[in-house]
Amino acid sequence: MNEKVNEILAQFTKDRANLIPILQKVQNTERYLSENDVKEISRFLDLTENDIYSVASFYSQFRFNPPGTHIIKVCLCPACHMQGSSRILESVEQELKVRLGETTGDSKFTLERVVYSGCPGSAPVMVIDQDTYTRMTPEKVKEVLARYS
């Protein structure tokens, strides 16, 4: 039993309407939803594990594998897309030898996409952890990634 998860569950009633807030809190604490986390939530809410996986897998915010130390998010909103964000994504994939949604073999980086970065006037945008990089170019990708190695 995971004590942190049990502390989170204690903050909620056993109402199935609490599933998404519980999943969010658990993932914010644990960084992902482990098999054991799903089992504990299942027992608490009296839902099947399949019910929980069905709901959680519907939302792109939830992950079931441990993320890398650094989370890279490439914005693919229309403004960023028009400014070449797909080339930024390709450059990151080539540099790290991963595809969108994957984590590098050394668990250093996880590559994700966002649909809106909040910086439409600075497109294309890439975010690593809490650091935002605006007006990205494929040529800048290697330089930016080197800061996190």
Image (cartoon, grey):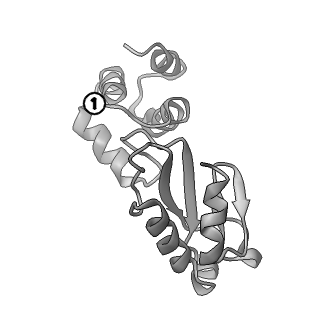
Q: Quadrant of residue 45?
A: top left
Q: Which residue is mark 1?
A: 47
Return the residue nearer the eye: 5 or 125.
125
Question: Which residue is rendered at x = 66% and y = 71% of the image?
Answer: 140
Q: Is residue 41 left or right of residue 149?
A: left
* Helix, strand or loop status at disc 1: loop
Return the residue nearer the eye: 134 or 8.
134
Q: Would you place residue 12 above or below residue 138 in this image?
A: above
Q: Would you place residue 60 above or below residue 45 in this image?
A: below
Q: Is residue 19 left or right of residue 116?
A: left
Question: Which residue is rendered at x = 25% and y = 33% of the image?
Answer: 49
Q: Position of residue 84 (x, y in %)?
A: 58, 83
Q: Is residue 149 left or right of residue 3?
A: right
Q: Position of residue 42 (x, y in %)?
A: 31, 27
Question: Which residue is rendered at x = 69% and y = 49% of the image?
Answer: 130
Which kind of residue does numbered mark 1 sit on?
Leu
Q: Position of residue 8 (x, y in %)?
A: 52, 21
Question: Which residue is rendered at x = 57% and y = 81% of the image?
Answer: 81
Return the residue nearer the eye: 55 or 129.
129
